[in-house]
Amino acid sequence: MSVKQLSLFDQQPEDSNKFFARKRPWSAAKHRIMLKYIQAHCYNLGGRKSYQSMYINYVDGFAGAGKYDEGIGIENFVDQSKFWQRYKTEFLDTDGSPLIALKCAKIFSFEERVTLRCFFTEEDKDLNQELKSNCSLIGEGLPYKVYDPQRFDKTLTQIMNELEKYPTLFFLDAFGVKGVTFEQIQHIANYVSQYKGELFLLFHNRAVARHAGFYKTSYKNSKDQKTAETYTQNLTNTTLI
């Protein structure tokens, strides 16, 4: 199987606080996928049939500020969608994943299809405060929780205890390669296998390669470059298994 190496992370800023100044094209693409996925996930598993649940959880492990100063890619996408044209939506280009989830929850609540319970974590204190403020403008009357500033891997046990065995969609988009261990990913995978749900995990293969010393902007010779390309390619192949 041939796999093309995607350059999604070339422009990622080193400072997470600067990340939310402007939404980049790959973030917009990610949010469009997430918007469609939440809708499909809740329509499939949410309801009163025997295999469905009236409650579904959404966990955003690296929520950030919840919105961007400048945004792209959502409003036109929604306007051109036959599905979303049925609703009076409030989606904005500046929406981050938490606000997208809450606005979906509002629509699901209005049509009495399913209750989407949202759980957000953000370890940076300033971003966490912005997240709480941004969510409060959208989430009135909706079941959501913003945890106090703490790393996701430190909050996970508390989150798992509050999911109440409902189907859960985990959205884990770590900044770089920190914040969640493979043991915790396995724990999450076991939960969704037992109680239904999905794990949406963005794996920064180039960040892993860079920290391992195999990804650089320049190389001493073609042999070193070939080794780095092979290492990064193997990471890509591994995440597709």
Image (cartoon, helix red, strand yellow):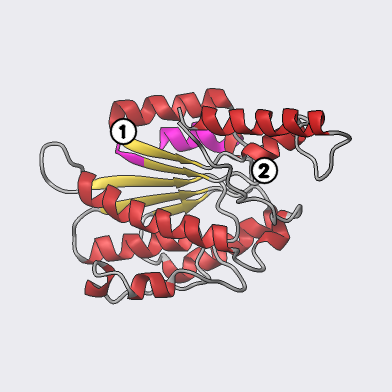
Please name the residue that numbered disc 2 is placed on. Answer: 176
Q: Is residue 156 magenta-colored?
A: yes
**Horizontal placement of 226 versus 41: left or right?**
right
Is tag 1's residue or tag 2's residue first in the polypeptide sequence?
Answer: 1
Residue 55 in percent (x, y) is at 26, 46
Quarter of the picture holding the N terminus: top left
Residue 165's disc number: 1
Going 43% across and 69% down the picture, which residue do you hit?
Answer: 138
Residue at far front of view = 222
Which of pointers 1 and 2 indicates the residue nearer the eye? 2
Residue 47 in percent (x, y) is at 16, 48
The residue lying toward the viewer, choosing from 13 and 69, is: 13
The residue lying toward the viewer, choosing from 41 and 64, is: 41
Query: Which segment is the magenta one?
Result: 154-168
Residue at far left of view = 49
Going 65% across and 33% down the picture, which residue do you hit?
Answer: 232
Q: Secondary structure at mark 1?
A: loop
**Horizontal placement of 56 versus 212: left or right?**
left
Q: Residues within 10 Å of mark 1 (few under 14, many from 20)?
A: some
Q: Secondary structure at mark 2?
A: loop
Quarter of the picture holding the C terminus: top left
The residue lying toward the viewer, choosing from 128 and 177, is: 177
Q: CA distance from mark 1 to mark 2?
A: 30 Å
Q: Dividing the picture into quarters, in which one does residue 234 lie?
A: top right
Q: Dividing the picture into quarters, in which one does residue 34 lie?
A: bottom left
Compared with 49, 221 (above or below) is above
Residue 178 shows in this picture: no
Q: Residues within 10 Å of mark 2 (few under 14, many from 20)?
A: some
Give the residue type at disc 2.
Answer: Gly
Compared with 106, 241 (above or below) is above
